[in-house]
Image: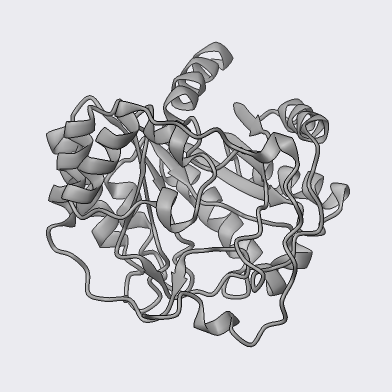
Amino acid sequence: MKIRHPEKINKPSNPIKKKPIWIRSKLTNSKEFFLTKTIINKNNLITVCQEANCPNITECWSKRHATFMIMGDTCTRACAFCDVKTGKPGKLDPFESYKISSAVKKLNLRHVVITSVDRDDLKDGGSNHFYEVIKQTRKINPKTTIEVLTPDFLRKGDSYKKVLDANPDVFNHNIETVPSLYLKVRPGSRYFSSLELLKNAKKINKNIFTKSGIMVGLGEKKEEIIQVMDDLKSADVDFLTIGQYLQPSVKHFPLDRYYSPKEFDELGEIAKAKGFLLVSSSPLTRSSYHADEDFAKLQQNRKNKN
């Protein structure tokens, strides 16, 4: 059995703090949950819901909402917060675009979120694979809106433009944390490169909604969170998500503290006052949590603004 996080074996152990009552998600035995699970398993698909150990999986799958993760289940980065496997990835699946588009059709999704692991081993970072998956999904599901949650394509030049050529409805890239924590939390990434990616995506296609998210509870200060909001607003990001960091294991980055629901409400109000089209701020908020409903809100908010 392969070790999930070989790079973390020799790191010091950090005890996991007990979760407060507002963090605990409800279990369900919904028929829809098992239908979603069956379709995903039969098509041999990977979801970030499973790989990242998302606390909302039962709720989302019960609504037939699943976030597909393409290009394998093994990431070339070693972010200190993430539960996705780290190591040497395998070859790309040439049939993945057909598998994804077929699953979207069987689930009858109005809105689908497609993400991926980082593939620093590929010359284009996987941008062409994103393109193929988006185009095939739209071909088979013309009424389904498509949201992508992409890597940063760091040191891959203009390869990210290939993703935009496929014209997704939402282009999401998570900033994840504040600049002062990047070297510890996200050592393989660069804060300002992520900002530039989001900024360029909007420049290239004004009609695409841009989106980004940040975790809290890693030791950041409130003023640092507000600065990230200002930076993302300067990059013309439309939608901001703010959620609680949950420590996956004792070898992952230590949780500093749990924010209360009231604190999330306060951060949400600050972000809304800065002019984002949409803000989602709560303990269980994740990038694709309620993505279907949120896309409808984005469209309506843009319409109202114009």
Image: 93 above or below 61:
below
Residue at horizontal 42 percent and vertical 58 percent from the top: 51
Is 149 displayed left or right of 265 in the figure?
left
The residue sitting at the bottom extreme is 10
In the rendered image, is residue 206 in sight? no
Residue at horizontal 51 percent and vertical 56 percent from the top: 197
Residue 135 lies, in percent from the top left, at: 19, 44
| Quadrant containing the C terminus in the rendered view | top right
In the rendered image, is residue 46 in sight? yes
The residue sitting at the front extreme is 29
Image: 291 above or below 165:
above
Residue 73 lies, in percent from the top left, at: 35, 65
Find residue 275 and report its image quarter: top right
Residue 283 lies, in percent from the top left, at: 68, 38
Image: 185 above or below 275:
below
Is 92 displayed left or right of 52 in the figure?
left
Find residue 178 and report its image quarter: bottom right
Q: Pick whichever, 163 or 80, lies toward us.
A: 80
Image: 125 above or below 18:
below
Q: Pick whichever, 60 or 185, lies toward us.
A: 60
Residue 92 lies, in percent from the top left, at: 22, 69
Q: Pick whichever, 37 or 269, lies toward us.
A: 37
Q: Pick whichever, 57 or 184, lies toward us.
A: 57
| Number of numbered tags placed on the structure image | 0
Residue at horizontal 74 percent and vertical 71 percent from the top: 14
| Quadrant containing the N terminus in the rendered view | bottom left
Render colour scheme: one colour
Residue at horizontal 21 percent and vertical 46 percent from the top: 100
The residue sitting at the top extreme is 304
